[in-house]
Amino acid sequence: MALRNKRAGIGGQNEANITPLADVTTTLIVVFMITMPAMMWNGFQVNQAEAGAESSIVTPTEAPDEDLLTIEVLPTGITLNGDVVAVESLESVLSAELAGRSDKTVVIAPDDAVVLGLVVEVLDIAKASGAESLAMLNRIGS
């Protein structure tokens, strides 16, 4: 009789409990749904320039456009339209310059030898100063 009771007890344990599996699966789905938009966000939208048949020849100009606010990020420091500006005071100086302008475009021209982190910091400062659009300028051979 004792043998039969052991088999009856073992037979009841053969069913799998899927509740923990369902809990873990549901938790993973929720975590992926929350983190996916953060992983897909690109901080800045960059539009690639397209060359048309009418603009196949590009002639560089030596003189910078005086109407644009140009920030040069050099290894020696930062200049705003040719005037040396400290990083700490760039936001206040740039805000004052942008306040009197209708075109709130800022052109940033980094040097090849500058660390990327400094360029990103200047981009953040320009956006915080009230720039509506930002442009990057690549100077070849400078």
Image (cartoon, rainbow, N blue to C red):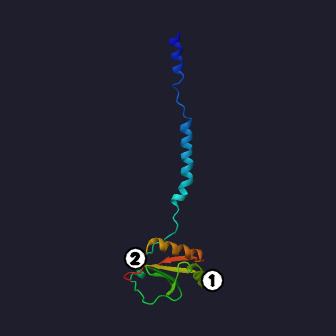
Q: Position of residue 101 (x, y in %)?
A: 60, 85
Q: Is residue 103 visible?
A: no
Q: Residue at x 52, y 66 (%)?
A: 43
Rounded to the nearest angstrom, the CA distance separating label 2 from label 1 is: 31 Å
> How many marks can you see?
2
Q: Which residue extends farthest top?
A: 1
Q: Is residue 118 visible?
A: yes
Relative height, residue 119 to residue 68 (above, below): above
Give the class, few, some or many, for how many residues have Cα within 10 Å of label 1's Cα (few <14, many ≥20): few
- Looking at the image, is mark 2 or mark 1 earlier in the sequence? 1
Q: Position of residue 77 (x, y in %)?
A: 47, 81
Q: Position of residue 8 (x, y in %)?
A: 53, 17
Which type of secondary structure does the marked residue at label 1 adopt?
Answer: helix
Marks 2 and 1 close (CB-CB < 8 Å): no
Q: Amino acid at mark 1?
A: Ala
Q: Residue at x 51, y 58 (%)?
A: 39
Q: Amino acid at mark 2?
A: Ala
The quadrant the C terminus occupies is bottom left
Disc number at residue 107? none
Q: Which residue is mark 1?
A: 99
The answer to which quarter of the image holds residue 113 is bottom left
Give the class, few, some or many, for how many residues have Cα within 10 Å of label 2's Cα (few <14, many ≥20): few
Mark 2, mark 1: which one is toward the viewer? 2
Residue 57 left/right relative to 134? left
Which type of secondary structure does the marked residue at label 2 adopt?
Answer: loop
Q: Which residue extends farthest right?
A: 99
The answer to which quarter of the image holds residue 17 is top right
Q: Position of residue 9 (x, y in %)?
A: 54, 19
Please state which of residues 3 and 40 is positioned toward the viewer in this rendering. Answer: 3
Relative height, residue 38 to residue 129 (above, below): above
Relative height, residue 35 to residue 55 (above, below): above
Q: Which residue is mark 2?
A: 113
